[in-house]
Amino acid sequence: MISEPPIPENEFNRILDLSELDLDYTNLEKNFKDLTKLAAWVAGTDISLLNLIDSFTQWTISNYGLPIEQMPREESVCQYTIMEDDKFEVQNLTLDDRFKDKPYVVDHPQVRYYFGVPLKTKNGNNIGALCVLDTNVKVLTPEKIEMLKVIADEIVNRLMALKAIQTLTHNVTETKEVNKRLAHDIRGPIGGIIGLAQIISEKGDKNTLSEVLEFINLIQKSGNSLLELADEILNSEVKASQKNPELKDHELNLQLFKDKLEKLYLPQAKNKEIDFTVTLNPANGIVPFPKNKLLQITGNLISNAIKFTPPHGRVSTHLDIELGKETKTLFIEVSDSGVGLTSKGIEDILSGSSSSSANGTKGEQGYGFGLPLVKFLIDSFDGSMSITSSPGAGTSFRITLPIK
């Protein structure tokens, strides 16, 4: 019998807080390696993990003593830690019915002891946990527990700082680039206009009508070049796509987006023997665009598709981008050969009222807020979502996101 999973009362706000950090789980290790090692040293344990928990998955963004990157949320101990305000401890996992049959208890590394501290944001939401584990039963002193809480607070502070730095860097970089471009490109046409006006002024009455007309024509051409420059600046992102622009920390392109999705979700698909593919339009594969929670939106759709697709089924994702004069439009399609949706189920998702906690095709437990989060994020970006599905015939989610 599968017990009901622990779900915080503030689950939607919790995963929304996590999505606001706009984290890329594939490259955070270097920012927290020192703190996970320090936590193990303080506790005197073999293992220390820094885990963030979204709608479906526990992501280990930094580890010490156990090389792990992710596991299904329902398999984790930390799903219980995020239910607590202060801490969660299990003296002996083999004696607890919730954990005694878990692979990491029965098989390598045969963990016995667990102690976790929730990672609480300023909004009071637990987005994950700092945990220490050991292959022997242990007892932590009050002093060690307080030190682990201090480390957990520092982890949250560092996560918030990374988000602030990312936002600030994005804004400063954009401002500098625009100013530099304007200063360089406008200097020529304006200099030409000033020079021609000076010639007319110096010659005064000696200017013939034909000369004046010629100068006026030249001034007009310089003025037109300024207008053309304005259009060029507005369309500069389109022109940049014809080159191979260097990506900044806050940016993705279709190729990098594809690589990250494969790295994050291929393990989940392989674990369930599902054929998972990501394809893209190669013509626009290197066009840069802001991350803007795209990993969170697409990842939730992929995890949901894997959950409701039987073993040996398929889940596919296709990425494309359309280049306009002032905006780019990103297209994301996630399709599966899973159980499908009823028309009522589709209506609930599109209205944002869906909160299904149904189990997956291999008994995966449901937490209910992955798709509402996707709908909320898409609406916040003035995007749109359409769904094609019928019971037993799979589902296809099509997302359209304008990128200004």
Image: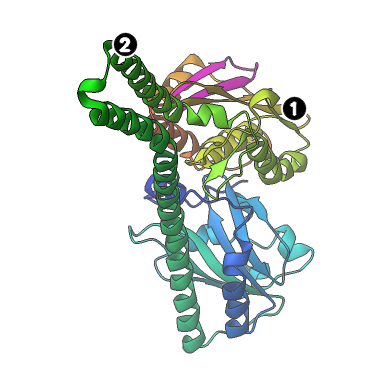
The foreground one among 22 and 152 is 22
Q: In which quarter of the image is residue 224?
A: top left
Q: At numbered mark 2, what does the secondary structure look like: helix, strand or loop?
A: helix
Is the image coloured rainbow, by chain, by secondary structure, or in one colour?
Answer: rainbow
Instruction: In the rendered view, tell whether residue 120 sits above or below residue 313.
Output: below
User: For the point 41% across and 52% down, which residue is it?
Assistant: 172
* Residue stretch rendered in magenta on the structure: 384-404
**In x, y percent, where is residue 305?**
62, 31
The foreground one among 25 and 47 is 25
Instruction: In the rendered view, tell whether residue 54 sits above or below residue 150.
Output: above
Say which mark, if any, is on residue 330. Answer: none
Work out whether residue 22 can be spotted. yes
Q: Quadrant of residue 263?
A: top right
**Label 1 – label 2 distance at C-alpha:** 79 Å
User: For the point 65% across and 37% down, which residue is it?
Assistant: 244
Circle 1 sits on which residue? 313
Q: Is residue 97 left or right of residue 121?
A: right
Work out whether residue 97 can be spotted. no
**In x, y percent, where is residue 127?**
46, 56
Q: Residue furthest top?
A: 210
Three-letter code for the amino acid on which mark 1 is drawn: Gly
Q: Is residue 373 left or right of residue 68?
A: left
Label 2, residues with CA under 10 Å away: few <14, some 14-19, many ≥20: few
> Majority secondary structure of the magenta segment?
strand
Q: At numbered mark 1, what does the secondary structure look like: helix, strand or loop?
A: loop
Three-letter code for the amino acid on which mark 2 is drawn: Ser
Circle 2 sits on which residue? 210
